[in-house]
Amino acid sequence: MNILLNTMAIFLIAATLAPSLPSKHWLVRVWEFPRLQLLGLMVIVLIARGIMYPSGLSVFNTLITALLYIGLIACAIYQAIWILPYTFFYKKEVVKASSQDTGESISILSSNVFMPNEDYDKLLKHVRDTNPDFVVTLESNKRWEIALSALNETHPHQQHCPLENLYGMHLYSKYPLKTAKLNYLVEDDVPSMLVTINMDGQDVTLYFLHPKPPSPTENKTAKPRDVELTMVGHEIAKKEGPIIVAGDLNDVAWSPTTRKFKKISGMLDPRIGRAFFNTFHAHYPLVKWPLDHVFHSSHFMLEDIRKLPDIGSDHYPLLTRLKLKPKA
């Protein structure tokens, strides 16, 4: 048991330090994702070590063991610092709108549908029940496009990009689209959408993104994803007026890349001070990460944000309702 606990401690310390290495390879960057899971394992190992502390060790072995577990405690604190903002212990970044606040509301239902999934009616039921202004689907192909034609009456303003490579995207809107543009920012098979609408006399810009993740089956490095988010961040920084960014960014909320995007763009995250809102994975209880995001400018207050029930995908849909502050 002593060997097992020490091995676990060494692994957990290494997994904590790995993302600090100057590498974008997926084997390094993947450890940015499971910070909560790593923290949980650290707590278990520390408790087990406290209960089963070995006796009769030499002075040297006692010193090495003490240093190992001091390092593990430091790593546990380090992991907690990364994820703390996404708990109710932290100050909320976005103000909650009250019933007295005036201004027009906007709601976005974002859903990575998982292309092979055929439970179309589950998503359509969520749309009927929640009545969002925008529905954006990710990983949607022509088959999904046909199935979602039921939205033509309620959400007649649309932009379609059906693909068979897991990076198709469809947008359904109640608002007329003042402008609508389909972009391929970094990779020629990964689209994004940029639209503008008019709300309460103000032009509102919306970005919908779905970059590839760093993984052995997608991109071997995080560079294309990181570059896309940085590009969009710089573009937003040059704009004025209300802005919303939504989609599956294939990145966790607490990663350095997402933090960099927020810093560059000035976007706010309504999850900070509230909860993780883990949208992935829908079927594995111990693998839960916030991969689907909504960011917005300071022109908005939060009315509601919640994860919707399973639609047969590996992602849960995310519903966000914002209220636009009246123009000064």
Image (spheres, helix red, strand yellow):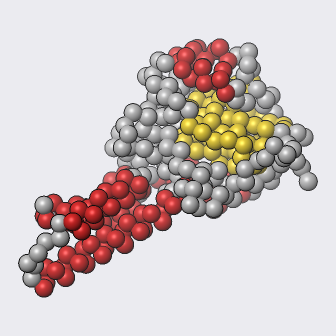
Quadrant (top left, top right, bottom left, bottom right) of the N terminus? bottom left
Q: In the image shown, does 58 or 55 lie closer to the viewer?
A: 55
Could you tell me which residue is drawn at 63 percent across and 33 percent down? Answer: 109
**Residue 260 place in picture, x, y as percent:** 57, 60
Viewer can see residue 97: yes
Could you tell me which residue is drawn at 47 percent across and 18 percent down? Answer: 118
Quadrant (top left, top right, bottom left, bottom right) of the C terminus? bottom right
**Depicted 107 relative to depicted 288: above or below:** above
Q: In the image shown, does 237 or 41 lie closer to the viewer?
A: 41
**Residue 244 place in picture, x, y as percent:** 70, 45
Kindly indicate the quadrant of the structure image that contains residue 238: bottom right
Looking at the image, the residue that sits furthest to the front is 51
Kindly indicate the quadrant of the structure image that contains residue 161: top right
Could you tell me which residue is drawn at 69 percent across and 54 percent down? Answer: 94
Residue 299 falls left or right of residue 144: right
**Residue 202 place in picture, x, y as percent:** 86, 43
Residue 158 falls left or right of residue 36: right
Total numbered labels placed on residues in the image: 0
Residue 189 falls left or right of residue 180: left
**Residue 67 place in picture, x, y as percent:** 25, 78
Q: In the image shown, does 62 or 194 lie closer to the viewer?
A: 62
Could you tell me which residue is drawn at 46 percent across and 39 percent down? Answer: 280
Viewer can see residue 112: no
